[in-house]
């Protein structure tokens, strides 16, 4: 029996799973949110907000309130704590699920002991928890100073490893625990000690792995709801709720948000097996998911005060944000590198005549695109292998599996054997697979392989025996041994990153577009020849009627194929006659320019998309091409502005082809909206020249501006001046009001400095609270001094 209760009905409600056979899933079924008891260093009152009466009690109420538990049941709150305290307690919002500190709260008549009271509401029940006040209180200013010091240290870290190492050190320095670990959850649910700081007498647990059952599913869910958990003394005797069931609901009390909630006996025994007496866990949440824990252990009883718990909770939230920033930075850096390599490779492929042959020719470069040891390409039934791969027969069987309707078009795994059993025979050369099915009909598939990576994992005990059967059938007991247990993992490769998978997907799409454009060009050529043949045949129709009909049928078939391809291409496709009248306008052209096909067909291309200032140039170019065959646009890839239906100008990239017959000329154009690309270029230019906070020129831009002005050789009549300013008294503002207030001040200073200088002058922020102004054309020293004084007045008025 895991929970000692006298009420049989309550016990059955709480422990309905104990008759099940021994299974690791029992860890996931243990109802740790309804233990029916609390840790005994405090007391808990469950209050009905409607009647304002106490419904359930747990803990040593005689010590805290000088009243027996049964004497408190059914009592109004104001008779215990006084009217003023009761009023503030009972005005909590119904959605106040986070514990709220109530400040000074003493029993009526000032009986009992000094306490730290917190309250929250869960499922319509008002919880009031009282814990003894800390004997060593520090001021709010001291606590803010400690937090500021930690955040300053973390903000200076340059890698995720350095951040986690600093986090374990700072949490231990603040809390005084014997050991602090940063425990990270891996993709397979297992845990890894990613960082550790400890006293010398404890064995190191750094880089040790733990099975997923050590922190079961429902425990992880509670860590998301209640981000901090403490156990003051693992040897405690639980203080039961009186009564066990809530009188209003008739159900066990959901204590998910309670700091004093009693702990699973399995977890208590687990801590004892680790020789841990007290512990604290702080959740690390990244993007709403439980990324890991700050796990603190102590070898003797240790109670963590309310203000320290709140400090750790805040630091845990900040640590999650800092981890997210480091992870995103790493992903973005890798994505940029992969994008550069992908675009470079695509540019080389684009320059060749046949896309299919060029891909095979550069398959080794394709292999290296995502750092793979091998690659395979299937196109038109021809399979090409490169590097470390399965045999051709094995690769064809694998591709057949990937082409099944149930499979995704992009598939990535570090262990192919887990999904495809036949892969075990070639796991040495191809354990990891990244596959992109570009087209099912005809099959066009790209595969990347990674060789087996034999990894030796250090486990804290045998991971295949995380729990042991207890003395009672169906009861679980945590393992007793945490000695190093090494395991060599087979049939796995180094995992594919999100950036690599995304890059492979984009590369596949680009290849599909290139192939479709190749087909379009081929069909265009056929169409041109057929148009010529059609006119010749029509001229000789009296003698070649039957042959002409066959050619016309073939032409119609090709035209239908061409129309289908043009309709589904990722570029806008527009066709005009030699007068500029639109004869073709696909779906993508509708999306880009907002004109429907019905509106566009027959209309002048000049009126639809050519801006007024470019129309004369368009007419001249068209006239010149029809007369001489020369053009600045036809046969070239051109970037220019185009007009949408709503009057907005957008940047586009256009590739125009002219199809000439004996009697007419047809112009076909592929158009791509390059607005995203231009915005990225503009953002990169802005980031390289501007300070992100204030919008002023940054240090690099200031140097460039100064260099240009110096190269212009200032003279006595037109001298060059440089003013350096920093803000006195700025650090105390940051320290007392916070970085947000400091940032707001820097923005306002920047705005006012620009106002008191001329447009030709440069105002820059070169770091922190330091500004540099570069001015020229102020030969009058008094005038310069006036500008400088204005700048100083600006700063003084703000400081």
Image (tube, rainbow, N blue to C red):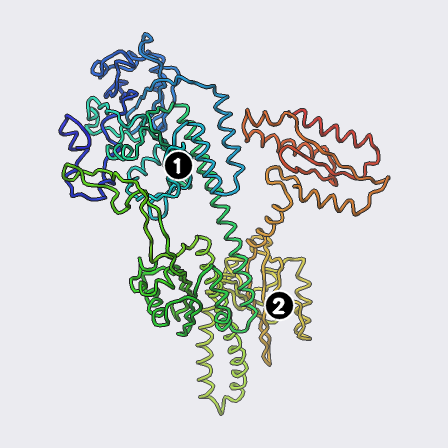
* Lateral position of residue 141 relative to residue 452, left or right: right
Residue receiving disc 1: 181
Taking depth in this image into account, of 167 and 370 the one nearest to the observer is: 167
In the rendered image, which quarter is residue 672 located in? bottom right
Quadrant location of the N terminus in the rendered image:
top left
Q: Kindly state the secondary structure of the residue where label 2 is placed.
A: loop
* Lateral position of residue 563 relative to residue 12, left or right: right
Q: Is residue 480 above or below residue 118?
A: below
* Lateral position of residue 223 relative to residue 629, left or right: left
- Label 2 and label 1: CA atoms lie apart by 61 Å
Taking depth in this image into account, of 244 and 133 the one nearest to the observer is: 133
What x and y, as percent, mark residue 273? Answer: 27, 35
Quadrant location of the C terminus in the rendered image:
top right
Taking depth in this image into account, of 644 and 325 the one nearest to the observer is: 325
Residue ID at (42%, 34%): 316
Q: Is residue 519 above or below residue 537?
A: above
- Disc on res. 513: none
What x and y, as percent, mark residue 554? Answer: 45, 80
In the rendered image, which quarter is residue 606 located in? bottom right
What x and y, as percent, mark residue 182? Answer: 40, 38
* Lateral position of residue 412 relative to residue 361, left or right: left
In the rendered image, which quarter is residue 713 located in? top right
Q: Is residue 208 above or below residue 647?
A: above
Residue ID at (47%, 19%): 139
Task: Indicate which disc, 2 or 1, sits on the residue closer to the N terminus.
Answer: 1
Residue receiving disc 2: 636
Crowding at dot 1, Cα within 10 Å, few <14 / some 14-19 / many 20+, comes out as many
What x and y, as percent, mark residue 368? Answer: 48, 62
Q: Name the front one of labels 2 and 1.
A: 1
């Amino acid at each position: 029996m895991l929970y000692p209760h006298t009420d049989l009905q309550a016990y059955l409600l709480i422990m309905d799973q104990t008759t099940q056979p021994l299974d690791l899933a029992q860890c996931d079924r243990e109802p740790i949110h309804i233990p029916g008891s609390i840790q005994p260093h405090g007391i808990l009152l469950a209050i009905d907000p409607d009647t304002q009466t106490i419904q359930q009690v747990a803990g040593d109420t005689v010590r805290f309130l000088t009243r027996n538990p049964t004497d408190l049941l059914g009592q109004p709150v104001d008779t215990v704590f006084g009217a003023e305290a009761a009023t503030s307690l009972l005005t909590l919002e119904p959605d106040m699920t986070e514990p709220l500190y109530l400040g000074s709260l003493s029993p009526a008549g000032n009986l009992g002991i000094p306490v730290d009271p917190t309250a929250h509401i869960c499922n319509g029940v008002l919880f009031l928890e009282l814990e003894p006040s800390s004997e060593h209180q520090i001021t709010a200013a001291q606590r803010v100073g400690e937090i500021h010091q930690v955040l300053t240290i973390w903000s200076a870290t340059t890698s995720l490893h350095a951040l986690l190492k600093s986090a374990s050190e700072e949490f231990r320095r603040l809390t005084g625990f014997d050991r602090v670990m940063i425990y990270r959850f891996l993709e397979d649910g297992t845990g890894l000690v990613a960082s550790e700081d400890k006293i010398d007498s404890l064995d190191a647990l750094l880089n040790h792995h733990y099975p997923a059952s050590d922190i079961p599913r429902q425990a992880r869910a509670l860590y998301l709801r209640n981000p901090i958990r403490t156990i003051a003394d693992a040897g405690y005797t639980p203080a039961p709720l009186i009564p066990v069931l809530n009188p209003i609901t008739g159900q066990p009390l959901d204590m998910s948000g309670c700091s004093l909630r009693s702990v699973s006996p399995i977890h208590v025994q687990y801590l004892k097996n680790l020789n841990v007496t007290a512990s604290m866990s702080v959740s690390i949440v990244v993007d709403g998911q439980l990324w890991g824990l700050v796990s603190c252990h102590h070898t003797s009883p240790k109670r963590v005060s309310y203000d320290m718990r709140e400090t750790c909770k805040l630091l845990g939230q900040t640590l999650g944000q800092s981890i997210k920033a480091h992870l995103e930075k790493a992903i973005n850096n890798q994505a940029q590198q992969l994008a550069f390599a992908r675009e470079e490779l695509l540019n080389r492929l684009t320059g060749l005549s046949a896309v299919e042959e060029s891909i095979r020719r550069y398959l080794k470069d394709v292999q290296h695109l995502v750092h793979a040891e091998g690659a395979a390409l299937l196109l038109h039934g021809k399979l090409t292998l490169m590097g470390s791969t399965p045999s051709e027969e094995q690769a064809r069987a694998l591709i057949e599996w990937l082409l099944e309707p149930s499979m995704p078009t992009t598939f990535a795994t570090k262990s192919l054997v887990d999904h495809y059993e036949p892969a075990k025979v070639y796991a040495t050369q191809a354990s990891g697979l990244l596959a992109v099915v570009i087209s099912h009909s005809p099959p066009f598939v790209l595969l990347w392989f990674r060789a087996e990576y034999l990894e030796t994992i250090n486990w804290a005990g045998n991971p295949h025996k995380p729990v042991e059967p207890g003395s009672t059938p169906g009861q679980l007991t945590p393992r007793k041994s945490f000695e190093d247990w090494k395991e060599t993992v087979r049939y796995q490769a180094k995992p594919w990153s999100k950036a690599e998978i995304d890059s492979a997907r984009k590369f596949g799409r680009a290849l599909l577009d290139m192939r479709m454009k190749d087909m379009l060009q081929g069909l265009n050529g056929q169409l041109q020849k057929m148009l010529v043949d059609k006119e010749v045949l029509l001229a000789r129709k009296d003698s070649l009627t039957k042959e002409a009909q066959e050619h016309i049928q073939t032409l119609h078939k090709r035209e239908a194929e061409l129309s289908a391809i043009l309709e589904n291409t990722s570029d806008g496709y527009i066709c005009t006659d030699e007068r500029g009248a639109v004869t073709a306008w696909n779906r993508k052209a509708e999306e880009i320019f907002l004109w429907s096909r019905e509106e566009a067909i027959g209309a002048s291309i000049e009126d639809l998309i050519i801006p007024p200032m470019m129309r004369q140039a368009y007419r001249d170019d068209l006239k010149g091409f029809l007369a001489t065959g020369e053009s600045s646009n036809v046969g070239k890839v051109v970037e220019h502005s185009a007009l949408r239906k709503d009057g907005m100008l957008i940047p586009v990239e256009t590739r125009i082809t002219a199809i000439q017959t004996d009697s007419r000329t047809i112009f076909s154009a592929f158009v791509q909206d390059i607005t995203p690309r231009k915005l990225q270029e503009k953002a990169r230019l802005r980031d390289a020249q501007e300070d992100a906070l204030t919008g002023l020129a940054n240090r690099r831009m200031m140097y460039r501006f100064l260099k240009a002005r110096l190269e212009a050789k200032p003279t006595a009549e037109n001298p060059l001046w440089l003013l350096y300013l920093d803000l006195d008294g700025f650090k105390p503002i940051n320290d007392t009001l916070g970085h947000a207030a400091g940032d707001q001040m820097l923005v306002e200073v920047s705005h006012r400095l620009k106002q008191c200088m001329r447009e030709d002058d440069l105002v820059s922020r070169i770091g922190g609270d330091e500004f540099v102004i570069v001015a020229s054309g102020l030969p009058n020293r008094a005038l310069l001094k006036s500008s400088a004084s204005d700048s100083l007045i600006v700063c003084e008025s703000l400081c």
